Image: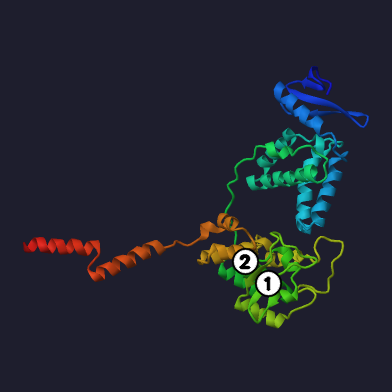
Amino acid sequence: MREKQRKVGRGIYLRGRTYWLNIQKNGSRSWITLETSDAAEAVRKAELLRENLLLESGSPLIAEIARFIAYKTRQQEYTRSTAVTKRNKLLLFAAGLPPNTTAATVSTRQIQKFYDAALRRTTDTTALGYAMALRAFFRWAVEVARIARRNPVKEVKIARTTGRARKDFCTYDLRNQLVREAPTDELKFVLFCGFHAGLRFQEIVEARPFWFDLSNGLLNLRKTPTMHFKDREERSVPLTREFQAFLAAYGLRAPFMLRPDIPHGKWLYRYDFRVSFMSYMRTQKCAWVTPHIMRHTFASLLVSSGESIYKVAVWLGDEVGTVQKHYGHLTPDDHGIEKAFSDRESALSGSGNSPASKREQHASRSERR
């Protein structure tokens, strides 16, 4: 802040092309960017800042991120896996800022720069995920922790996201082959959960015996002390006959269906089946198949066979719009309209009232004349 400055109001200085506010609180003086080159707007923003000087003293940004994640987890708004993902995104942003940065001193310009960089190296939806994580953090900082005056993400210019259709999924034959040739029952259970029910990784790991209603052929996903669903909603998925037959032999194991001998410990997941899963896929020359590809396969095969996208969304625990965006391109051609008109045409033809029939009758009468 040693560049040439010009005072234009009480505590307001023009540094380069941007106005800054110099304030003193608790015996210490600090500079806050007003993020504008317009003098009138700078005065207005400065007055708003002065009116809200009762903010709590903020800790370094990294410490506040830890507080935010702990709060969201305590409120059961983030699952353990979501908390890890959000924390990593926020820490990546913080890593590019000076060590003494606080929530109150972060500017829209800094967030815009971070978002634009993410947009260049990743997809638009991934970059949007970074921006949404920051927006949630600063909303908490303003409304709950009171360590920031405003949410700087609100003024970030976000690119319009187009979304991407899911293109990687297994065929019916490959899916059946992978399940049939699985070397262990536990791996088969994992494959059935993913391919036949569309469960997420964490849902497979945390699956409880009371979720499986074999008499009614339903898989009822319900909250437990260690399982809170991504969409916060419990759901039910019909069990396929193959899955039911497997479960009858596999048994309802307690307290967990998969590796019940392994309790929760210090790790994020109670049990991580991905090592054995990926090893098996490599032996099958299907290294591209991941646990999430099983979920894509579940949805893709249903939609491509003509199942309602609404039903698929309910079974996946996703929004209908999300399923439409990712799998709508797989919807088979709907000949319902053509069939309706064809049936009507046939019916009218049979009764002699169709337009074509009337034309023929008129021509016949004209000839007789």
Taking 126 as reference, is 105 left or right? right
Disc 1 marks a residue whose amino acid type is Asn
| Residue 108: x %, y % from top left | 73, 35
Amino acid type of the residue that numbered disc 2 sits on in the rendered structure: Trp
Asked if the residues shown at circle 2 and circle 1 are in contact, with their CB atoms under 8 angstroms apart, the answer is: no
Which label belongs to residue 315? Answer: 2
Residue at 65% over, 70% down: 236
- Of the numbered discs in the image, which one, if any, rests on residue 96? none
Residue 244 appears at what percent x and percent y? 65, 79
For residue 130, what is the image quadrant?
Answer: top right
Answer yes or no: is residue 146 visible.
yes
Residue 70 at x, y percent in the picture = 83, 53
Q: Quadrant of the N terminus?
A: top right
In the displayed structure image, the side of residue 140 where residue 159 appears, left or right: left
> Which quadrant would the C terminus be assigned to in this image?
bottom left
Residue 86, compared with residue 18, is above or below; it is below
Residue 37 appears in view = no
Mark 2 burial class by Cα count in 10 Å: few <14, some 14-19, many 20+: some
Label 1 crowd bin: few (<14), some (14–19), many (20+), radius 10 Å:
some
Q: Secondary structure at mark 2?
A: helix
- Looking at the image, is mark 2 or mark 1 earlier in the sequence? 1
Q: Quadrant of residue 143?
A: top right
Residue furthest toward the left? Answer: 369
Q: Nearer the viewer, residue 17 or 163?
A: 17
319 in relation to 187, above or below: above
User: Which residue lies at the image location 56% right of the left edge and 69% below the top edge?
Assistant: 172
Residue receiving disc 1: 220
Q: Residue at coordinates 72% horizontally, 44% vertically from top-left?
A: 135
Real-space Cα separation, disc 2 to disc 1, in angstroms: 10 Å
**Residue 203, position as x, y percentages in the image:** 72, 66
Along the line of sight, the residue nearer the viewer: 310 or 326: 310
